[in-house]
Image (cartoon, grey):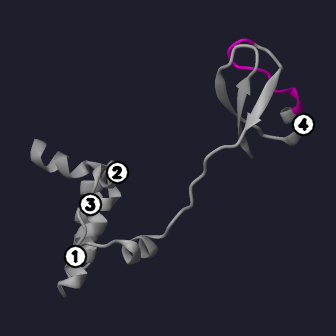
Amino acid sequence: MPIYEYRCNQCEREFSQLFLNSREIRKVKCKFCGGNDLKRLISSFSVHQTEGSRLAGLDTSKPKGDDFYKDSRNVGLWAKKRMKEMGVDLGPKMDEIVERGRTGKILEDYDK
């Protein structure tokens, strides 16, 4: 099921559209003005990385920029890698703590 992005040549607005089957692609109209004079855009994409590949590429010695903190998984991965570098193994309990911190559930412990 592809998602395509379009720019309407009538109202000049951009939108994305999910298609459940290929016949719908030919019937697409602007979500804003209903026009059918559309240009399909080239969309950005991302590649999924496993936790192992992210850990391998993480350099704990370099300073972190603002983008590092935009992904809540980074801080936990940094802590895991740093502990591994130092020879510390806290076992599955550490994974649980990192996951609770990443999702914000760890704050529930302090609300009690």
- Which label is found at residue 23? 4
Q: Earlier in the sequence, mark 3 or mark 1?
A: 3
| Amino acid bearing label 3 | Val
Element class at badge 1: helix
Residue bearing the label numbered 2:
67
Q: Are marks 2 and 4 in contact (CB under 8 Å)?
A: no
Dividing the picture into quadrants, the one containing residue 65 is bottom left
- Which label is found at residue 82? 1
CA gap between label 4 and label 3 equals: 44 Å
Element class at badge 2: helix
| Amino acid bearing label 4 | Arg
User: Quick check: is 112 in the magenta stretch?
Assistant: no
User: Quick check: is 28 in the magenta stretch?
Assistant: yes
Q: Nearer the viewer, mark 1 or mark 4?
A: 1
Q: Quadrant of the C terminus?
A: top left
Q: Are marks 2 and 3 in contact (CB under 8 Å)?
A: no
Residue bearing the label numbered 3:
75
| Amino acid bearing label 1 | Arg
CA gap between label 3 and label 1 equals: 10 Å
Q: Earlier in the sequence, mark 2 or mark 4?
A: 4
Q: Which residues are magenta?
A: 26-33
Dividing the picture into quadrants, the one containing residue 87 is bottom left
Within-10-Å neighbours for mark 3: few <14, some 14–19, many 20+: some
Toward the viewer: 65 or 70?
A: 65
Within-10-Å neighbours for mark 4: few <14, some 14–19, many 20+: few
Element class at badge 4: helix
